[in-house]
Amino acid sequence: MSDNATGKTAVLLVNLGSPDAPTPAAVKRYLRQFLSDRRVVPRSGLLWWLILHGFILTTRPKKSAERYERIWSKEGAPLKVHTEKQAKLVKGLLGQRGHILPVTWAMRYGQPSIPETLARLQTEGITRLVVVPLYPQYAVSTTASALDEVANWVAKTSNPPEICTADSFFQDEAYLAALEQTVRTHWQQTSLPDTDYCLVLSFHGQPKNTLGAGDPYHEECLATGRQLAERLNLAPEQYRITFQSRFGRGEWLQPDTAEILKELGREKHRRVDVICPGFVADCLETLEEIAIEGKATFLAAGGSVFHTIPALNEHPLWIAALTKIIEKQLHD
């Protein structure tokens, strides 16, 4: 069958975003938009404006640009590169399964933006749209923020398309199977780990106060981590679920990835592997924060062997899982 028999249905994949270039100016523009989002930083008023513009945006862009420079590829920002490839592969697989329709992508912050992409789709005559935020675990600061941006565009648009969304897929069987195979392939390529081994499952952090605010993110991360560990037949002492990317002085979800890597290094663990199940595409947080900074932290603390397991990226099982998630929305 063809969902696009009338030429009106499309799919939009949404991810977080990246600066346009690994430069202080581009990073400053990106951070200004990111940190002005009330879903990310639920503060407003003169005090936060002064902190953001008087301190953060004057000191952080240069350092962040240097971090982006370390992982920037010839094709551009890794997150954008992988997201674009995912969209193309999903379109192809949907076509093989009888769903002939456009599949495009947008970023919550930076380019291509959600409003501009939605406007383009409307000019192309799209009247039905499946929006898939590429965050396996639902969080107010990610999934809800992306859907806010879609809703804001709809509110300002006359005759917008009918929209359905996939909110999260933290325990989707096909998603978990793709993660499992990624780990098992890594083990085969690096030799199977011995008893002195720990797999760190690192998720992006959130302020701890989200726990009491109805945000399911923490529980969904724990569920994904535990189910993946079970599929891999790991004993409790062979894996740790942690949270990275702590920002500011407030209390964040624990345990902190960097602190756990220090602890494992001090315990002289022979080998530690790190996987980031919450990121379906490699980006600054996986390629720089974990693969570079995390490795240095572990080795400096006394650890021996450190590996970062790649994100799902264009793994065939992940493309198939994402296609199934979209198909469910098309059928519904």
Image (cartoon, helix red, strand yellow):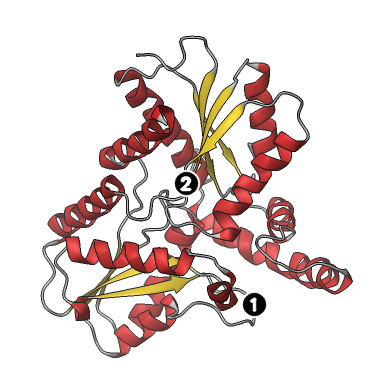
Asked whether the residues under the numbered discs 1 and 2 touch, taking CB atoms below 8 Å apart as contact, a structural biologist would say no
Amino acid at circle 2: Leu
Q: Looking at the image, which residue sits at the far right?
A: 46
Residue at far top of view: 6
Quarter of the picture containing the C terminus is top left
Could you classify mark 2 by the number of other residues whose Cα lies within 10 Å: few (under 14), some (14-19), or many (20 or more)?
Answer: many
Residue drawn 64% across the image and 77% down it: 248
Query: Would you say residue 139 is visible in this rendering?
Result: yes
Quarter holding the N terminus is top left
Q: Which residue is mark 2?
A: 134
Gap in angstroms between the C-alphas marked 1 and 2: 25 Å
The residue mark sitting in front, 1 or 2, is: 2
Front one among 142 and 214 = 214
What x and y, as percent, mark residue 255? Answer: 42, 81
* Circle nearer the N terminus (1, 2): 2
The answer to whether 69 is drawn above or below residue 251 in the figure is above
Identify residue type, mark 1.
Gly
Q: Is residue 17 above or below residue 221?
A: above
- 188 lies above or below 98: below
Q: Is 178 on the left-hand or right-hand side of 63? A: left
Q: Which of the pair 126/294 is nearer the observer?
A: 126
Residue 208 drawn at (x, y percent)? 55, 77
Residue to which mark 1 is pinned: 248
Residue at 52 percent across and 42 percent down: it is: 80
Relative image position of residue 167 (x, y in whole percent): 48, 48
Q: Nearer the viewer, residue 329 or 32?
A: 329
Tell me what residue is drawn at x 45 percent, y 79 percent.
256
Relative to 17, residue 49 above or below: below
Q: Is residue 109 visible?
A: no
Query: Residue 183, percent across and down?
Result: 22, 57
Label 2 sits on a secondary structure element that is loop
- Crowd class of label 1 (few under 14; some 14 to 19; many from 20; radius 10 Å): few
